[in-house]
Every structure is written in C-alpha cells, then in structure tokens.
Amino acid sequence: MWIMRLVPSSLTLLASISPLIPTPCLARRKWNDTGRGTIAFEENWGVPEIMGPLAGVSPQLQADILDVHNQRLRRMDENGIDFMILSCATPCIQGISSPSLAASTAKSVNDQLASQISNNTFRFGALAALSMHDPVEAAQELNRTVKELGFFGALVNDYQQAGDNNDTLIYYDGPQFDPFWKMVTDLDVPVYFHPRVNVPLILNLTYSHAPFLIGASQEFQATLSTHVLGLCTNGVFDRFPTLRVIVGHMGERIPSDLTRIDSRLVAQRDDGLTMNQTVRSYWHTNLYSTTSGDFDTSLLLFHKGQIGIDRIMFSVDYPFDSIEDASTWVNSLGGTKGGKGNALTREELLALKRETAIKLFKLNH
Ligand SMILES: *[C@@H]1O[C@H](CO)[C@@H](O)[C@H](O)[C@H]1NC(C)=O
Ligand SMILES: *[C@@H]1O[C@H](CO)[C@@H](O)[C@H](O)[C@H]1NC(C)=O
Ligand SMILES: *[C@@H]1O[C@H](CO)[C@@H](O)[C@H](O)[C@H]1NC(C)=O
Ligand SMILES: *[C@@H]1O[C@H](CO)[C@@H](O)[C@H](O)[C@H]1NC(C)=O
Ligand SMILES: *[C@@H]1O[C@H](CO)[C@@H](O)[C@H](O)[C@H]1NC(C)=O
Ligand SMILES: *[C@@H]1O[C@H](CO)[C@@H](O)[C@H](O)[C@H]1NC(C)=O
C-alpha cells in the first residue's frame, strides 16, 4: 500500500485530514537505517494501568519505562541505536487473571503504544501485548495489531496467570493453542518469550528458602526455559515449521545445555515424546536468542558454536539494563579495521547488531 511508505510527519498530517486512515499505521515505514547502528527489541515500555506490579522498582526506572521520546531517544542517539521495538513491561497482561480485563487492557495498551510512537516511527516500532486466556482471541488481537497498527509481532511475558486465586497457569504449548500459532505463522511475525515473576503460590513453595533468587538471577530463566522447552517437546515447531520464537537473555540458558537436554529427551522417545527433531535443531529453524541483559563475550562465543551467530541478535532490556553498557560491549566485539576487539568478524558483528533483526522483522520490505 503506497500510504505505508510515507514518512511519519506526512502520515500524521494525512491522518488528520483523511478519514481513510482510522488508526496509526506503522508498518513498512522508513526507518533510521544508518547502515551500522543497532536494532534493539527487548525494550520495556508501559502505561500507568499496567505499572502496579512494578511498584517496587525505583522511581527512576518507572520514569524510564513510561518515557519514549526523551531520555530513551537521547540514549539511543548517543549509543548508536538506529531503531527500537518497544513492548509492554513484564508481567503486563500475563499478570491479569480476569479474562475480560486482560483482553480489554491488551487492546488499550496496544492502542496507546501505537499512538505514543506514531510521530516517530522512524525510530520506534512495537510488539503487541496479548491476553493469552483464549487462543482465538489472542490470534485476533495479534492480527489487529499487525494489520491495522503495523506492529512487528508480539511479546508474551511467560505463562498467563488465571483463576480466582491466581492459581491457574496457562502455557501455550498444547494443541488448544494451535489457532494462535496458526495466526502467528500466517502473519509471518515472530513472538518474543519474555520472563515474568511467578504467582505468589509458586514463589512461596519454591523460593521462600532463598528469596534472593527471585527475579533475574535465577527464577526468570528457570521458569521461562521450561515454557520454551515445552514448545519443543510438545511438538509446536513440528506442527508449525515456520514459527519463529525469540528468547532473550542469551536464550534463557537453553543453548548452554543442549547436549544434556537432548540426550535425556531422545532417550524418552519410546515413552511417547512427540517432539520430532532435537532441541538443538529447533535453534537452527525456529528459535532465536538475544543478548539482552547478558553482555558476556565468552558466553556469546560459546553460543555461537552451539547455535550459530545467525541465531543471536543484539538487544538491551532497557531500562533494567543500560543502553550504554550494552552498546559499549557490542561495539567492542570487533568487526572494524584496527578496531578494539577481534571476537567477531565484520560480517558476524553486523549480523548480531542488525542484519538478522532486519530480516526477521522485515524492516526493509
Ligand atoms: C539515527 O540513529 C543514530 C544512532 O544510530 C542517531 O545518532 C541519529 O541521530 C539518528 N538520525 C535521526 C535522523 O534520527
Ligand atoms: C512526538 O511526540 C512527543 C510527545 O508529544 C514529543 O515529545 C516528541 O518530541 C515528538 N517527536 C517527534 C519526532 O515529533
Ligand atoms: C485480520 O485483520 C484484517 C484487517 O483488520 C482483516 O481484514 C482480516 O479479516 C483479519 N483476519 C482474520 C483471520 O481475522
Ligand atoms: C490476584 O492477582 C491480582 C493481580 O493480578 C490481585 O489484585 C489479586 O488480589 C490476586 N488475588 C488473589 C486471591 O491473590
Ligand atoms: C505461604 O506459605 C505460608 C505457610 O507456609 C502461608 O502462611 C502463606 O499464606 C502462603 N502465602 C501464599 C501467598 O500462598
Ligand atoms: C512427527 O513424527 C511422527 C512419527 O514419525 C509422524 O507421524 C508425524 O507426522 C510427525 N509430526 C509432524 C508434525 O511432522
């Protein structure tokens, strides 16, 4: 559609004079392609209605989550981030047990995100927040955000909590979620699997003995990696071979342990395991990882050997991690003539910083 190629300012102008554009259409935009800057897409944003569970984080972090156009953009400019794809800060909709409230909040959050970035789609894109209580409803909202709002896919914050006592956990790896995965693959967009803090019942049973392990030191990886491995072992990638799922924080540790994971799983084939490939192989066909919150060169090189540099992409996890730290690190990895580091070749570094993400999100289509 010709209108999608307009620059944002003309779009805003047109939107104000033309009833033909009912909502901000963000897809297929011109973006700030410097040829060398990074693309970042595990980047947290929020509106007051979802900030309740984040009441414990510092006022500065809360302000950084709510901000788009001020300190966030300035830090992007200062550190060479060409384009940032925003998503709703954890747990967002996955922390809402009421299905009707979850569905209406998801729509509201998505509309607000589209509206907030609509005057600078040159620098900002979006991933949808979805209520995952109902796979068909989730599919419809994903379709709406991609087709009508120009979003690049979705980000789910691990399992959907449900039930009157918040004691039902909905995972997306069973056959009842196939209508959702069908929509995802029909739209050909990726879904980001992001961590969430567990419901109180699980925290109580599992972490009372060692509460400092709640959060990003251990709990997030342990919980989310189980969900991602559930997608593998329940055959979701066999039924949807073109499905692309992104797993942040260096793949929530899964690429660090593929030998043991696969050797134990393969041994269970005779017991009815329906996974047709190996977990390692899904990292070459369906799964991607990002560097969010995990800026470690030796780990990156180990994972390069395990899953390939073309499955790993740059991201920050702003504002929980610093744009400056992430950018300084990634730019130290080499790739420039006479540059500081030599961990990666120029081509590998460009793939990590931007080229793989440009292809995955079809930024140049
Ligand atoms: C494009 O991004 C770079 C950071 O990579 C920034 O310094 C520059 O100001 C941006 N250009 C525009 C026009 O936004
Ligand atoms: C977009 O709107 C926000 C809020 O009004 C403003 O702060 C920002 O400067 C605007 N950005 C552009 C590129 O016009
Ligand atoms: C997806 O959204 C588009 C645009 O609103 C609509 O025309 C289409 O019917 C939707 N597809 C499905 C399968 O709901
Ligand atoms: C369930 O969680 C919601 C927040 O998601 C909270 O407001 C409510 O008090 C919780 N209910 C119970 C019974 O824990
Ligand atoms: C946690 O367990 C203790 C007893 O072991 C109980 O008193 C408390 O109500 C539980 N809290 C939750 C949120 O389940
Ligand atoms: C998985 O393998 C089984 C047994 O070889 C086969 O019957 C089934 O069709 C395969 N499933 C998919 C989705 O490829």
Image: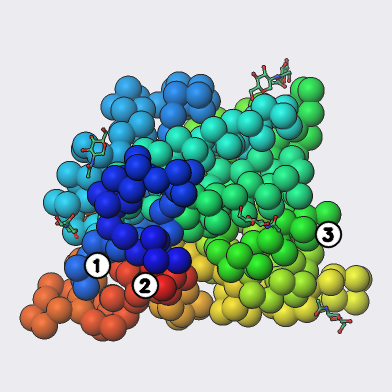
Q: Which of 2 and 263 is in front in this view?
A: 2
Q: In which quarter of the image is residue 353?
A: bottom left
Q: Is residue 44 visible?
A: no
Q: Does the residue labelled 3 lie within 8 Å of ligand 6?
A: no
Q: If the picture is divided into quarters, which one holds ligand 3?
A: bottom right
Residue 185 at x, y percent in the picture: 65, 67
Q: Which mark is residue 175?
A: 3
Q: Does the residue labelled 1 lie within 8 Å of ligand 1?
A: no
Is the C-beta separation of discs 1 and 2 under 8 Å? yes
Q: Which residue lies furthest to the right in this view?
A: 271
Please give the name of the residue rendered at 47% of the width and 74% of the height, measured from the top-left corner.
Answer: 311
Query: Element at badge 2?
Result: loop
Q: Quadrant of the N terminus?
A: bottom left
Query: Element at badge 1?
Result: loop
Q: Which of 193 and 103 is in front in this view?
A: 103
Q: In which quarter of the image is residue 101?
A: top right
Cα–Cα span, label 3 and label 1: 40 Å
Task: Name above or below for residue 104 compared with residue 293.
Answer: above
Label 2: which residue? 364
Cα–Cα span, label 1 and label 2: 9 Å
Q: Residue 33 carries which label?
A: 1
Q: Name which residue type carries label 2.
A: Asn
Task: Name above or below for residue 62 compared with residue 252.
Answer: above
Task: Name above or below for residue 220 compared with residue 26.
Answer: above
Task: Name above or below for residue 228 compared with residue 216.
Answer: below
Crowd band around label 3 with a 10 angstrom C-alpha radius: few (<14), some (14–19), many (20+): few
